[in-house]
């Protein structure tokens, strides 16, 4: 158990819908990262938050947004869902912004299926 | 830009034997970190081992060791005394640092599926 929690574990929805994925980092960790894992794209970095502020953006679609709340939990919002958004979405957390040796610990993931 | 290449889509090993999973990387960053993660069939990503680019010695964590050859830009994972529970997908990843700014994101390779036979 990494200490990172993600809910829900599975999500099945229809095209055009909107969903929210939730993540709670390990106790004491200030950085939260979101990744998408799909068969064709592999593991892709989406976005990073540090202590409530957005710090880095990767290949995140405009239909996707995220935020980190004062209690440090984070939510990833996916809207106008398409079939191609079906993937495993991971949240990871680390202690600092990105120091040397700052390990990212991953949650169990949310498997999103868009029908 | 950073790139991780794992050239072995699948590897097989006999239980109790050692196995090496290959990873090569490409980066122009002056310092960087290399990580290995394990993803069992259940889907979670488990951190295994870390190697810093300026570390003088190869990292070790229990049965896992990292064969780091900086000049060759390789960071191979060695698993000794393989166990059936080692059957999983293994990912090599890196994070770079340049000019005092660190990039928090991890860049992952495509992964290697390891199967341990009894």
Image: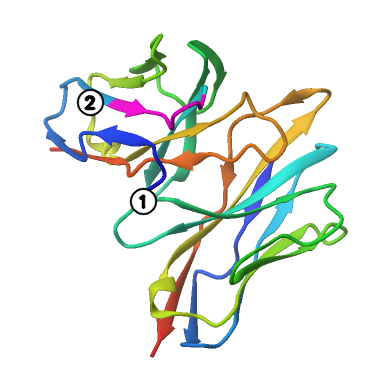
Q: Residue at x 46, y 44 (%)?
A: A43
Q: Residue at x 67, y 28 (%)?
A: B103
Q: What chain does badge 2 belong to?
A: A
Furthest residue in direction front, as rendered: A27
- Give the residue number, with chain letter if any, for mark 2: A81
Q: Residue at x 81, y 23 (%)?
A: B100
Residue B18, percent from left and from top = 59, 83
Q: Residues within 10 Å of mark 1 (few under 14, many from 20)?
A: some
In the rendered image, the quadrant that contains the C terminus of chain A is top left
CA–CA distance between discs 2 and 1?
24 Å
Q: What chain does badge 1 belong to?
A: B
Res B39 quadrant in image? bottom left
Q: Is residue A27 magenta?
A: yes
Residue sitting nearer the eye, A58 or A40: A58
Res A56 quadrant in image? top right
**Vertical order, B76 against A83 (above or below):** below
């Amino acid at each position: 158990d990494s200490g990172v929690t993600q809910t829900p574990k599975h999500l099945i929805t229809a095209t055009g819908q909107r969903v929210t994925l939730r993540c709670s980092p390990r106790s004491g960790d200030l950085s939260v990262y979101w990744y998408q894992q799909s068969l064709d794209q592999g593991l892709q970095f989406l976005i990073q938050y540090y202590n409530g502020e957005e710090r880095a953006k990767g290949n995140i679609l405009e239909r996707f947004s995220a935020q980190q709340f004062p209690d440090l939990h984070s939510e990833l919002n996916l809207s106008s869902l398409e079939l191609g958004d079906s993937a495993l979405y991971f949240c990871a957390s680390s202690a600092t912004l990105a120091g040397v040796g700052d390990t990212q610990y991953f949650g169990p993931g949310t498997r999103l299926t868009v029908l | 830009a950073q790139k991780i290449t794992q050239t072995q889509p699948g590897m097989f090993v006999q239980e109790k034997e050692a196995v090496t999973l290959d990873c090569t990387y490409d980066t122009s960053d002056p310092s960087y970190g290399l990580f290995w993660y394990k993803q069992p069939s259940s889907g979670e990503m488990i951190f295994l081992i870390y190697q810093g680019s300026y570390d003088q010695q190869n990292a070790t964590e229990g049965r896992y060791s990292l064969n780091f050859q900086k000049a060759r830009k390789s960071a191979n994972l060695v698993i000794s005394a393989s166990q059936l529970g080692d059957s999983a997908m293994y990912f090599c990843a890196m994070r770079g640092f340049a000019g005092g700014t660190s990039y928090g994101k991890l860049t992952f390779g495509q992964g290697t599926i390891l199967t341990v036979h009894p």
